Image (cartoon, rainbow, N blue to C red):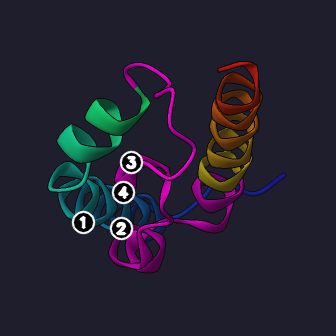
Amino acid sequence: MAKPSPTSLIDRLVDWIIYQCKMLRHRPGLWWNSAWIRKDEFDQSLNMDARVLVDMSEEDRKKYISDLVRRRNIAHERDLAH
């Protein structure tokens, strides 16, 4: 098995750092919106944020959408209960 070239490792590290820097500006909002699940299913925290989706990797995008759907369903159930 061939070892990855140092250039390849550096490129991957630079890509990772750039991705983390792009996501850093979104993390406070993502955290705040998922800190607790609102009772109102139409709360703005349950809207999909296109600016975040553009900067996310495919894996993070799937996790984000899955969590958003989960929180929307819980909020919907709470709305029906009241």
Please report the bounds of the magenta region as a residue range: 35-62
- Asked whether disc 1 touches disc 2, contact meaning CB atoms under 8 Å apart, the reply is yes
- Asked whether disc 4 touches disc 3, contact meaning CB atoms under 8 Å apart, the reply is no
Under mark 3, the amino acid is Ser
Q: Select label 4 or label 3 by which is in front.
A: 3
- Asked whether disc 4 touches disc 2, contact meaning CB atoms under 8 Å apart, the reply is yes
Q: Determine the CA span between mark 4 and mark 3.
A: 27 Å
Q: Compare marks 3 and 1 and give the one earlier in the sequence.
A: 1
Q: Determine the CA span between mark 3 and mark 1.
A: 26 Å
Q: Determine the CA span between mark 1 and mark 2.
A: 5 Å
Under mark 4, the amino acid is Trp
Name which residue lies at 62% across and 46% down: 68
Residue 55 x, y percent position in the rendering: 38, 73
Under mark 2, the amino acid is Asp
Q: In which quarter of the image is residue 76?
A: top right
Q: Determine the CA span between mark 4 and mark 2.
A: 4 Å
**How many numbered marks, from 0 up?**
4
- Asked whether disc 3 touches disc 2, contact meaning CB atoms under 8 Å apart, the reply is no
Dot 2 crowding, Cα within 10 Å, few <14, some 14–19, many 20+: few
